[in-house]
Image (cartoon, rainbow, N blue to C red):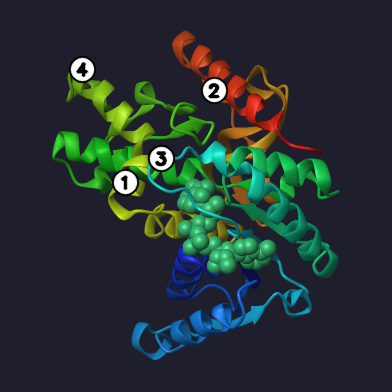
Amino acid sequence: MKVTVVGAGAVGASCAEYIAIKNFASEVVLLDIKEGYAEGKAMDLMQCASLNGFDTKITGVTNDYSKTAGSDIAVITSGIPRKPGMTREELIGINAGIVKTVSSSLIQHSPNVIMIVVSNPMDTMTYLVHKTTDLPKHRIIGMGGALDSARFKYRLAEAMQAPISDIDGMVIGGHSDTGMVPLASHATRNSINVSEYLSEERLQQVVEDTKVGGATLTKLLGTSAWYAPGAAVSALVQAIACDQKKMFPCSTYLEGEYDLNDICIGVPVILGRNGIERIVDVPLSDAEKAKMQESAEGVKKTNGLLEV
Ligand SMILES: NC(=O)c1ccc[n+]([C@@H]2O[C@H](COP(=O)([O-])OP(=O)(O)OC[C@H]3O[C@@H](n4cnc5c(N)ncnc54)[C@H](O)[C@@H]3O)[C@@H](O)[C@H]2O)c1
């Protein structure tokens, strides 16, 4: 199993590290445009191998796509992250050009690749890959919901003073401060609905904290987060590589599902060796359906800024 990660920055390197530590891929290629940067990160990560007990071979390359040839999975993290006070949508000008060039270069050398898009604004970048390449839709996956769901579970566990392993919950919709739809009505602690433990007011606070999870960290760190984003990407890569048939909310191209068309947005999907193997139809309340439509309007507005 060969995995390429484009962008050896904070998220790309974190993702490569988690993939290696989980020890399921034979090879990870890190590629960056900055001279020597990916080579340095790869060498540093390889020097963890004996300490962390993995055999995954990590190599770094400067913008040489021939070294990515034959990749089964490629992750796109190249682009600029947001600074405090910025929205993800403000990154579109620079990141659209980068994602377009990177995706076509990857496909040239790995025509059968399954692509995971991470660069922001992620739903629009996923749509861009859909519109500008001829990859089938099940091989274009946007990562956002897996991270947002992890943040939702963190906030729920914190509010209930419960271990996170007791918590289940999911965030669908657009990967933006206003577009996320945390499914509080479906969230549970050991199969008991979280509303049994939390007041309506406290649950609403959890939902709001989840939606600004990324912005909160950006304010604290001065740039966007990388550990949980890297872990979330590695979980998707593992689900595909190991054919796990796991369910994650991912951004995918919709043709009528959730009453939405011609958009990439977060919905629950089953991930396996073929990429997105199925879109899962979760029953939503009327309020959740309305929020999903509102979220889609926001994503479509950002898509309208693309020149495709
Ligand atoms: N979808 C998500 O949930 C999520 C989460 C966190 C971050 N992000 C996004 O991921 C992206 C990366 O964030 P980061 O914190 O790792 O940023 P970073 O600045 O640390 O790393 C980005 C890397 O991309 C490289 N790069 C730029 N243009 C390139 C090109 N044309 N080819 C190859 N490499 C190129 C840069 O040299 C840099 O090393 C940002 O757009 C950020 O907003 C998304």
Q: Identify residue for label 1.
A: 219
Rendered position, 14 above or below 274: below
**Mark 4 residue type:** Glu
The mark closer to the camera, 1 or 3, is: 1
The image position of residue 307, as x and y in percent, is 79, 38
Image quadrant in which you'd find residue 239 = bottom right
The image quadrant in which ligand 1 is located: bottom right
Q: Who's the residue at 56% across and 37% down the image?
A: 89
Helix, strand or loop for disc 4: helix
Q: Are marks 1 and 2 in contact (CB under 8 Å)?
A: no
Instruction: Measure the alpha-carbon separation of dots 3 and 4.
Output: 20 Å
- Mark earlier in primary sequence (1, 2): 1
Front disc: 4 or 1: 1
N-terminal-most mark, 1 or 3? 3
Residue 274 visible (yes or no): no
In three-dimensional space, the C-alpha distance between marks 1 and 2, rounded to whole angstroms, equals 24 Å
| Disc 4 packing (10 Å; few <14; some 14–19; many ≥20) | few
Q: Disc 4 and disc 1: Cα gap in Å?
A: 25 Å
Q: Amino acid at mark 1?
A: Lys
For label 1, count other residues whose C-alpha is less than 10 Å away and answer few (under 14), some (14-19) or many (20+): some
Dots 4, 2 in contact, CB < 8 A: no
Residue receiving disc 2: 295
For discs 1 and 2, the disc positioned in front in the rendered view: 1
Q: What is the C-alpha distance between the residues marked 1 and 3?
A: 20 Å
**To which residue does mark 3 refer?**
149
First along the sequence among labels 3 and 2? 3
Q: Which residue is mark 4?
A: 201
User: Does residue 12 sit above or below 96 in this rendering?
Assistant: below
